[in-house]
């Protein structure tokens, strides 16, 4: 029986609810699923691109879909060994956070309410509230999609940097299988309170009532702020984890709140979110992104860099 499906609608796997069809689609729940699927892919002899898809956050999928193989990572599993937790790459951040509260393990409270999977968080070194994924990663297990060789990297070998890692730099050459997190014992009530405080913050300040894929742009490093603006923007300065100016503040200052193209809109609740009002296309979202970048550049002389990835 074939493990590879054809013409699968990717909007069903997108937090944005946007995207055309994948020509080929492989859902991976185990390492064996991946190996069998890749062998079948080679037998087909298709000379097409491969893309790894996790929780469907932080990625804008083209209206034309993807003419290649999507590998959807659904690998689950949570195993506790003392203060180390090994989790399948497809586990959601939400489920991991709930487990950590139950086991009174601290170190990941910053991720409360963060969408997506742990595999995606490692790949993009996701962070919030002065915490980053790299702070808790001990080891990452992955598999090379070409050679099927399994690899294990420690924290240093993952080459973490701001919203980046070796897995992101290498593209889709390997798939993360599992992640081992290093945590510490704490008071359950305190861990739960800190985690839920961050969940509540997101619920109150992020436009979760609309489909979205999280932050659209990276925050602006203080070193990149023009000298003549530093005196005005110093009031906005925060550590994330190094000195940055929140890009949402700057987009709002540029008067871009509510900017709309088609059914895509800069949220008036949090301007670093571009939301799907119901029937947005990827082209609508791109139109909003370009308008925001152009106007911020014109008004302040600052180049915004997307945090969102594109799948064409």
Image (spheres, rainbow, N blue to C red):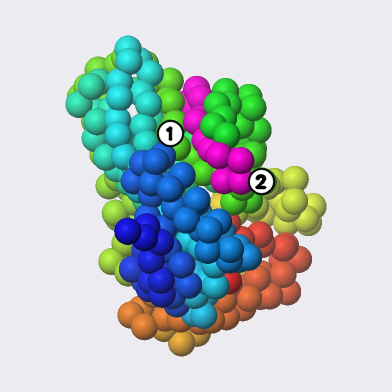
Q: Nearer the viewer, residue 262 or 57?
A: 57
Q: Quadrant location of the N terminus?
A: bottom left
**Residue 31 versus residue 39 in the image, above or below:** above
Q: Quadrant of the rendered structure where residue 182 is?
A: top left
**Residue receiving disc 1:** 178
75 relative to 160 in the view: left or right: left
145 in magenta: yes
Task: State the residue at coordinates (41%, 71%).
Answer: 6
Q: Secondary structure at mark 1?
A: strand
- Bin the neighbour count of mark 1 within 10 Å (Cα to Cα): few under 14, some 14-19, many 20 and up: many
Residue 170 shows which numbered tag?
A: 2
Residue 13 position (above or below residue 235): below
Q: Indicate whether 191 appears above or below 238.
A: above
x, y percent for residue 113: 32, 46
User: Which span is picked out in magenta?
Assistant: 135-148
**Which residue sits at x=57%, y=23%?**
154
Can residue 266 be seen here?
Answer: no
Residue 249 inside the magenta-drawn segment: no
């Amino acid at each position: 029986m074939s493990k590879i499906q054809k013409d699968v609608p990717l909007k069903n796997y997108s937090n944005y609810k946007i995207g055309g069809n994948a020509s080929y689609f492989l859902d991976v729940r185990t390492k064996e699923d991946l190996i069998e699927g890749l062998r079948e892919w080679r037998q087909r002899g298709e000379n097409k691109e491969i893309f790894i898809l996790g929780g469907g956050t932080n990625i804008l999928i083209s209206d034309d879909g993807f003419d290649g193989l999507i590998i959807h990572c659904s690998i689950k599993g949570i195993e506790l060994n003392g203060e180390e937790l090994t989790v399948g790459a497809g586990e959601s951040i939400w489920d991991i956070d709930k487990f950590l509260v139950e086991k009174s393990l601290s170190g990941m409270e910053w991720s409360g309410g963060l969408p997506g999977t742990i595999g995606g968080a490692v790949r993009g070194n996701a962070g919030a509230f002065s915490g980053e994924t790299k702070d808790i990663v001990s080891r990452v297990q992955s598999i090379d999609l070409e050679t099927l060789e399994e690899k294990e990297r420690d924290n240093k070998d993952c080459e973490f940097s701001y919203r980046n890692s070796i897995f992101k730099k290498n593209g889709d050459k390997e798939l993360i299988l599992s992640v081992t997190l290093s945590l510490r014992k704490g008071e359950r009530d305190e861990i739960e309170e800190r985690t839920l405080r961050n969940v509540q913050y997101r619920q109150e300040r992020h436009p979760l009532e609309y489909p979205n894929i999280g932050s659209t742009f990276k925050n602006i490093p203080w070193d990149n702020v023009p000298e003549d603006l530093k005196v005005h923007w110093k009031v906005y300065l925060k550590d994330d984890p190094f000195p940055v100016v929140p890009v949402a503040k700057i987009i709002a200052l540029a008067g871009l709140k509510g900017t709309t193209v088609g059914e895509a809109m800069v949220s008036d609740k949090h301007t670093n979110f571009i939301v799907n009002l119901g029937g947005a296309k990827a082209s609508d979202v791109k139109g909003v992104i370009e308008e925001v970048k152009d106007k911020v550049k014109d008004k302040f002389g600052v180049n915004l860099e997307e945090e969102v990835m594109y799948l064409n």
